[in-house]
Image (cartoon, grey):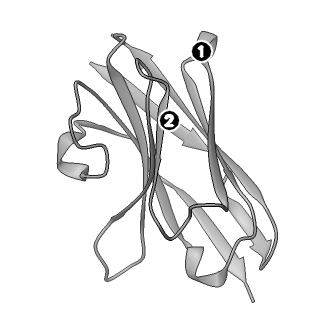
Amino acid sequence: QVQVAESGGGLVQAGGSLRLSCTASGKIYRNIVMGWFRQVPGKEREFVAAFRWSERSPYYADSVKGRFTISRDNFKNTLFLQMNSLKPEDTAAYYCAAGHGIEQPAVEGWYPYWGQGTQVTVSS
């Protein structure tokens, strides 16, 4: 089992920045993938970014490329999502997810472990 906990959400003005953190604990193996998804009420959850630890490969949704950046702390099994140039349309509940051996990091169905979510609100 893997536990996932995210933090760092909040309220920010358009053009501002926030950094989200996601820490995984429990039975973690080298092929772990950690991802970020977001959801607005009434809409489906959408992929934001992911990181494949074994290959050190980040993945980004087109909507956030160039604005969001993933980084990590290996020793703490923590993934960070630095969000810059935030837009009102980035407003959502952001969820961190994790799983092992994930072949499609952008597909939420591959992730068995999810955090509770953290709210990001961008005002115009």
The residue under the point 47% across, 66% down is 62
Query: Secondary structure under badge 1?
Result: helix
Mark 1 and mark 2 lie on one chain; the one further toward the N terminus is 2
Asked if the residue at tag 2 contacts the one at tag 1, i.e. Cβ–Cβ closer than 8 Å, the answer is no
- Looking at the image, the residue that sits furthest to the bottom is 124
- Residues 47 and 24: in front is 47
Q: Disc 1 versus disc 2: distance between alpha carbons?
A: 16 Å
Q: Position of residue 24 (x, y in %)?
A: 46, 24
The image shows residue 23 at horizontal and vertical percentages of 54, 28
Amino acid, disc 1: Asn
> Around disc 1, counting alpha carbons within 10 Å, would you say few (fewer than 14), some (14 to 19), or many (20 or more)?
few
Residue at 42 percent of width and 22 percent of height: 55
Residue 116 visible in the picture: no
Q: Residue at x 37, y 11 (%)?
A: 30
| Disc marking residue 111 | none
Q: Badge 2 is on which residue?
A: 5
Which kind of residue does numbered mark 2 sit on? Ala
Task: Depth check: give the residue in front, 10 or 44.
Answer: 44
Question: Who's the residue at 57% across and 61% down the image?
Answer: 65
Quadrant in which residue 38 is drawn: bottom left
Instruction: Give the position of the C terminus as an image quadrant.
Output: bottom right
Check the image and report above or below for 101 versus 9: above
Secondary structure under tag 2 reads strand
Apparent side of residue 121 relative to residue 28 in the rendered image (left or right)? right
- The residue labelled by disc 1 is 74
Q: Nearer the viewer, mark 1 or mark 2?
A: 1
- Return the x and y of residue 13 as percentages of the image width and height: 81, 77
Give the left or right position of residue 64, taking residue 100 as reference: right
Q: Quadrant of residue 46?
A: bottom left
Q: Residues within 10 Å of mark 2 (few under 14, many from 20)?
A: some
Q: Position of residue 116 (x, y in %)?
A: 43, 47
Q: Is residue 81 left or right of residue 47?
A: right
